[in-house]
Image: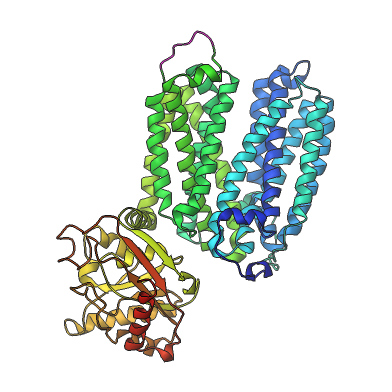
Amino acid sequence: MNKTKQTSHKTVGQLFLMTSRRFAPFFWTQFLGAFNDNLFKNGLVILIAYGTGNVVSANSDIFLNLAAGLFILPFFLFSATAGQMADKYEKSMLIRRIKIAEIMIMGMAAVAFLYSAGIALIFLLFLMGTQSAFFGPIKYSIIPDHLNPDEIVGGNALVEMGTFVAILLGLIAGNLLNPVEFPPVWIALAVCFVAVLGWLASRFIPEAQPPAPDLVIGYNPLTQTMKTIACARRIRPVFLSILAISWFWFLGMAYLTQLPNYTKKVLYGTYDVYTLLLTIFSIGIGFGSMLCERLSGRKIELGLVPLGSLGITVFGTDLFFATPAANHATLIGIPAFIHSAENIRVLFDLLMIGVFGGIYIVPLFAFIQTRTEQKIRARVIAANNILNAFLMVMAAVAGILLLGVLNLSVPEFFLALAIMNIVVAAYIYTVVPEFVMRFLIWMITHTIYRVRHANLGTIPSTGPAVLVCNRFSHMDALILAGACRRPVRFVMPESIFRIPVLSFIFKTGKAIPIISKRENPAAYNAALDSISNALEKGEAVCIFPEGELAADGETGLFKPGIEKILQKVRVPVIPIALHEMGTGFFCHSGGPPMRSLPCRFWPKITIQAGNPVAPEEVSADEIRERLLALMGTHR
């Protein structure tokens, strides 16, 4: 583990990371790199489209498509090698060398801009794509190396926000400094200056020791690409998360590619209106990314992924219906555009597509980083980049087929994207029901109850542990599952395990149903064996020693099951007190659960974890006393 991660830190917001050397230098390095990519690309695009007197301008349609293809091509050719290098070598050193390469490329680009050498600039765009392809696997694999588990979501959110803001600012800067309307020396100086700033920022990135220094690097692009994708497929949920991320880039590329024509030919807006739409979309993604930490409670919450895809579909569909009928003889600017309520609705839909896109993408990146073994993490990220590039190409193909062959309008194309998103989401969530399970938990714990918790850091992030909690409601397991940062297997009475709807969540979460020994000795012993097997595999198991819910909502006597479990497997025990739930619809207080109205809606719940107890000190009575003491601290 890196020394930077071992330092203690108190729980703070994600913006605190911007003041930490563990994150800030890396953030500004990647921000400046994304900015420079788009500054350079937009300057080149304008030179091709609007320049005069050179070969590329005379064949602008050909060279614009060639430029787009040459920037993406390196991700197919070099991502596999880049992933291997990021696993084999120290990452901060690799980043500094990549930034030095960027300075050299931008130095040549400066000369090419000064002489309006379009063909040379297109070749240099290929080189820029190459250095981006080598930076990609490092970009996301280094985050878990330097951040603590409760900072990973916030770190990814900042990176996503920063990337889209950098892209937007780079496009705007490329337009303002374009070499057609302004002296090319300005864009030449700008790309060199930003490249140097990126290198300076990279010098402050802490070291990240290589997880696989003995790895033998293969350089055959085709062979290594297949091996890299096979590496990502080792963990099925991770690979499907990669496909989900790639689908996001498919959607993003499809929207952004058609946005200029949508602005000009459908909304009858000027280039300034296009910039406004692009800004709104980018702000939405940045805001949605930053919102993830608050919505997830600083943990990796896969339940946000279905929420994100649902929002993309809803507002993508509304964008089709919100598109106003053509009623302008000439193109209109921003003042006239925002004067129309119909256009405000279009802006709102684009904003919300971006917001839900940010909510969708951040947990997926964090999930891949934490679920993937460290020694292959960079190669898995490289596989993600390869598939992202492939889906971005497929987005262009889809646009050609639907708009060019089937003659759909741009609004109809946006509707088709929303429908396709439903189909893709249904497939992914059917194959990986964990997404839906976490979504249901998130919805229940954020709409029915107000949950606050304290000291949950005493639950070990890895390794076996038994969590012991009191009983107040049929929803106890869901409340705890929504609060814990690691997966927990819950032991519960079979009668609760089979409650409709909840049974799907419990089965997907691999809960362990149990029946009293008096009713079915064989099933009881089988449940104990399942608990022991889970602990031997290093999993966390939560039990409710009271068994059934107390009729008066008070904490009952603890059964000796915890002692029997620890006779087989000696692991630490963490007491967890759950209280202030006595007025809810699912508890016993006030009558049978789910048969009477609650005394109040949206009740407040407190989860208080105690310090770990050594297995030799554990008894049912001792754990009960510790739980009662925890509950007393919040009464």
Principal SS element in the magenta part? loop
Q: Can you give x and y, in whole percent of width and height, for residue 470 in the image?
A: 31, 75
On whether residue 135 falls in the magenta region, the answer is: no
Task: Residue 579: name its quadrant.
Answer: bottom left
Which residue range is magenta in the image?
325-330
The tally of labels here is 0
Image-based side of 200 in relation to 333, left or right: right
Q: Residue at 25% across / 83% down in the picture?
A: 557
Q: Residue at 60% across / 67% down in the picture?
A: 9
Task: Residue 441: name its quadrant.
Answer: bottom left
Q: Nearer the viewer, residue 459 or 365?
A: 459
Image-based side of 162 in relation to 341, left or right: right
Q: Residue at 45% across / 37% down in the picture?
A: 352
Task: Residue 108: name its quadrant.
Answer: top right
Image-based side of 135 in relation to 438, left or right: right
Q: Nearer the viewer, residue 70 or 273?
A: 273
The quarter of the picture where the C terminus appears is: bottom left
On whether residue 329 falls in the magenta region, the answer is: yes
Q: Can you give x and y, in whole percent of width and height, for residue 204 in the image?
A: 75, 57
Q: Is residue 70 visible?
A: no
Which colour assignment does the render follow?
rainbow
Q: Residue at 37% across / 90% down in the picture?
A: 567
User: Is 433 drawn above or below residue 336 in the view shown?
Assistant: below
Q: Can you give x and y, in whole percent of width and height, for residue 167 in the image?
A: 63, 37
User: Is 569 drawn above or below residue 292 in the view shown?
Assistant: below
The quarter of the picture where the N terminus appears is: bottom right
Q: Can you give x and y, in whole percent of width and height, for residue 563 in the image?
A: 34, 88
Q: Is residue 202 visible?
A: yes
